Image (cartoon, rainbow, N blue to C red):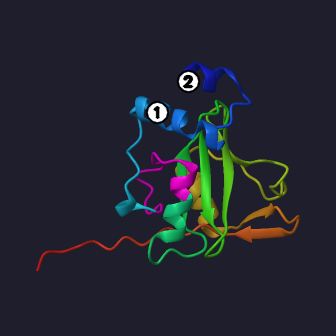
């Protein structure tokens, strides 16, 4: 799997048939924390990416209490040029997925056929990427060919205290 994902630019880690192979490959990498629904959706810059599949990310965003449009998860991808995917809740029922491209240690959002290139930028880190899109919308072409936009939001983390 590792060779397949690294060598085949058309390997589709989002394909349901490849989901289990993809999950095994991610677990073997041991570089990312596992999918822990108690810390999701994305809530801090200290952990830029979590280990979960496309389906898990969608379920978390649709089913976690107090999740609002703009809450998101950055998760790993098996593509060499697209090491991460951004999963964003658009409304209570619609979730969009974007690829995060990495070239020369710089990050940008893709696919370019859906993203407004006039507003797309390149970033030095995932944290810079997130910081930017917390204050500016991602403008994209939706599946219905209508232009839409969404601004990322951090999920509020409530710390439990002992009484």
Q: Residue at x 45, y 48 (%)?
A: 50
Does residue 1 show up magenta in the picture? no
Q: Is residue 66 above or below residue 19?
A: below
User: In the image, residue 114 lies at what x, y percent?
Assistant: 82, 55
Q: Residue at x 58, y 50 (%)?
A: 54
User: In the image, residue 61 lies at what x, y percent?
Assistant: 53, 66
Q: Which residue is mark 1?
A: 24
User: In the image, residue 82 lies at what x, y percent?
Assistant: 65, 38
Q: Quadrant of the N terminus?
A: top right
Q: Is residue 144 above or below residue 105?
A: below
First in sequence: mark 1 vs mark 2:
2
Q: Residue at x 47, y 63 (%)?
A: 41
Q: In the drawing, does residue 16 fall left or right of residue 143? A: left
Does residue 56 show up magenta in the picture? yes
Direction right: furthest residue: 145
Query: For numbered disc 1, what is the local secondary structure?
Result: helix
Q: Main secondary structure of the magenta part?
A: loop
Query: For numbered disc 2, what is the local secondary structure?
Result: loop
Q: Which residues are magenta?
A: 41-57
Nearest the viewer among 137 and 23 is 23
Nearest the viewer among 148 and 138 is 148
User: In the image, residue 162 lies at what x, y percent?
Assistant: 13, 75
Marks 1 and 2 sit apart, C-alpha to C-alpha, by 9 Å
Mark linked to residue 44: none
Q: Which residue is mark 2?
A: 1
Q: Quadrant of the C terminus?
A: bottom left
The image quadrant that residue 161 belongs to is: bottom left
Q: Are marks 1 and 2 in contact (CB under 8 Å)?
A: yes
Judge the density around disc 1: few (<14), some (14-19), many (≥20) Cα neighbours within 10 Å: few
Q: Is residue 42 above or below residue 81?
A: below
């Amino acid at each position: 799997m590792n060779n397949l994902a690294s060598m085949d630019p058309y390997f589709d880690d989002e394909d349901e048939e490849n989901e289990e192979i993809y999950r095994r490959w991610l677990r073997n990498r041991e570089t990312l924390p596992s999918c822990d629904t108690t810390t999701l959706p994305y809530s801090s810059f200290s952990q830029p990416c979590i280990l979960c599949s496309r389906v898990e990310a969608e379920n978390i965003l649709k089913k976690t209490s107090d999740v609002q449009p703009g809450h998101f998860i950055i998760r790993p991808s098996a593509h060499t040029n697209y090491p991460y995917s951004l999963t964003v809740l658009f409304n209570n029922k619609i979730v969009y997925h974007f690829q995060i491209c990495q070239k020369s240690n710089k990050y940008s959002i893709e696919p370019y056929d859906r993203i407004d290139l006039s507003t797309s930028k390149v970033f030095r880190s995932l944290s810079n990427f997130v910081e930017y899109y917390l204050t500016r919308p991602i403008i994209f072409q939706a599946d219905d060919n209508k232009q839409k936009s969404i601004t990322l939001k951090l999920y509020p983390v409530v710390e439990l205290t002992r009484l």
